[in-house]
Amino acid sequence: MSVGFGKNACVSSGDERDGGRGEGAPPEQLALIRESVRKAEVPRAKPRTWRGAALAKELPVARVLVDKGVLHLDRYFDYAVPEELDAEAQPGVRVRVRFGAGRGRVRDGRREGGGLIDGFLVERVAETDYSGPLAALAQVVSPEPVLSEELLGLARAVADRYAGSLADVLQLAVPPRNARAEQRPSPAPLPPPAVPEVGSWARYEHGGAFLEALASGGSPRAVWNALPGGEWSEEIARVVGATLASGRGALVVVPDGRAVARVDAALTALLGEGRHAVLTADAGPEKRYREWLAVRRGSVRAVVGTRAAMFAPVRDLGLVVLWDDGDDSHSEPHAPQPHAREVLLLRAAQDKCGFLLGSWSCTVEAAQLVETGWARPLVASREQVRGAAPLVRTVGDGDLARDEAARAARLPTLAWQAVRDGLRQGPVLVQVPRRGYVPRMACANCRAPARCRHCSGPLEGQEGVDALKCGWCGQEEAAWHCPECGGFRLRAQVVGARRTAEELGRAFPAVPVRTSGREHVLDTVPGAPALVVSTPGAEPVAEGGYAAALLLDGWAMLGRPDLRAGEDALRRWIAAAALVRPQGAGGTVVVVAEPTLRPVQALVRWDPVGHAVRELSERAELGFPPVSRMAAVSGPPEGVAAFLGAVELPGEAEVLGPVPLPVTAVRGARRVGAPPVGERWERALIRVPPGRGAALAAALKAAQAARMARGGVGGEVAVRVRVDPPDIG
């Protein structure tokens, strides 16, 4: 149902000369200037409106979604369809409308005033439920229908899940218009290809059956634990080929441009040119829109891209694929900040298509999909894993304490020997954690994380104070003891090895040293002996695989004050180790971390699935995501307090905090969602049990919309609301 406030868009006339003045009124200077401009120049492609224009004979009312990403305007608005625009004003096209005038600005039964704003025509109806006069559509920007019913339904589902506005989601889903790309016709669609061979999918217990189900028109759903090596891109290409062979479309979302290039090359090698499109945010506006239109028009049935492609309008969607769902790049930084995994899960449910979630590692969310029976595991036998994985060795605190070389050169003897032996066979990878990881407190005896007794949040030390403080609920803990071993001593990890590259260069002066990370990321390196120092996620692929890998400063990643610290550390370690040659070919990985820790043991056994299953079990006991649903409310203290006092949360909701957020420094990169530089903010976490996530999102959206509608009346301070925050401490 339309809302009366939405009809405030109005009609003005570029043809009337009096500008709304009474008869005999002297003309204003501005009106004379406009009159002279009209006579001197003929307007080109400017939006026009009508006064007294005849309406369309059939379905004269258009429901429009205006491009206003504010929650209290998250609704459709009714406009009249002039007869001149009847043919072009079809559902799904871009339009421009007058928006912002009130009921009082009506002349001779016509609404006037307001500014021009873009929007999408959602549907045409015969009547409106609004009692006042309707403004007319000002312009049909393009007759190209870009918003289908399926895409609109998906965008609405995403907006509801993340307590956001539909307009914000469509800004992510529909790229900006490019006239030149729109005028160029898309190529004719190619016939379905032949069913590809099973290939390396034969290494997995049910790999052949998965491809067969896709080729026969089925919709299997699986969580795929990929074997180490570079075959993953070819394996993705084969499942896409099997889906295309059934006459349906496929969508592949990967974390970054390097992964897109690998899947693009694999698809081209297997299927040939012209069967898939590449959608990334890095492409130019014309190329991106041209590729997107080819998908929308049905010329191309397969898409590969980064998170910008998660809304790609693939026709007859038969399969969605997501690679490495634990990567931070899959989380959209723009409102409402959806995650690609959740968007593809919604698409799989909406379109009843196949689903494949693949990674070398395994996230807790992926384990939950298998545990609930929604997806089936797609794994290899232990013999296949042992044959493909490298040998993993560990260096713990005890080894470092007894190692003179480690204290002198910050390079343990075992690591030095692995580098020396590896350089005889090929390149050696050295993974160094990024700067900025903040350690959390842990038991000095067994290394178990220190958790709050009230909410199980992470305990943090306070400068100049003996008591610990919870990073979630703010409760102080003066008498902590370890529930695992009963110890009373704590430790905080100090990040070291700042001169890793320099020390390695001195230790091996005859070997070239290459770096990959930050602004300079290498894609590939030759197979010749070399030292490759990389930050996590920036590891280049070596020709023939690395002979060895060093994973330094494990505590720097394990000590982050975040619920996902262990899971993320294991994922980054496995991603680097997967680039190393198999153990049978001499591949060795040395990780500098305490051997007794669960993520380290999972790496040694190459068992990320077992680690994720155990993490999921513990989170279920403690009420942590993904078993529960969480939302974060952050802002100035007075704003957070006012919001929490006004929001009508579900009865099962639990509020943790608020607690102060770290003050953003002037220098350094600012994290997404961090407070403005120098401002002191607080954050409260809201937790609900399973099945109440939709109610929580609806309550948060309603409270935020009410605050926006009031426009800050009464000194209200704006706050930020994020559902499913990736970092909760």
Image (cartoon, rainbow, N blue to C red):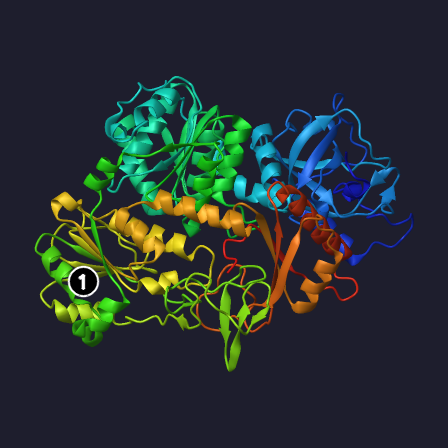
State the residue in front, 581 or 78.
581
| Residue 710: quadrant of the picture | bottom right
Instruction: Tell whether 24 sits left or right of 545.
Output: right
At a point 38% along the width and 21% down the height, the residue shown is 213
| Residue 400: quadrant of the picture | bottom left
**Which class describes the residues within 10 Å of circle 1: few (<14), some (14-19), or many (20+)?**
many
State the residue in front, 226 or 231.
226
User: Residue 18 location in percent, x, y?
Assistant: 83, 47
Residue assigned mark 1: 415
Amino acid type shown at disc 1: Ala
Residue 81 vertical position relative to residue 621 in the rendered view, above or below: above
Helix, strand or loop for disc 1: helix
Quarter of the picture containing the N terminus is top right
User: Residue 545 location in percent, x, y?
Assistant: 18, 47
Instruction: Tell whether 115 sits left or right of 342.
Output: right
At a point 22% along the width and 44% down the height, the residue shown is 389
**Residue 311 in view here:** no
**Residue 240 in view here:** yes
User: Residue 297 location in percent, x, y?
Assistant: 48, 26
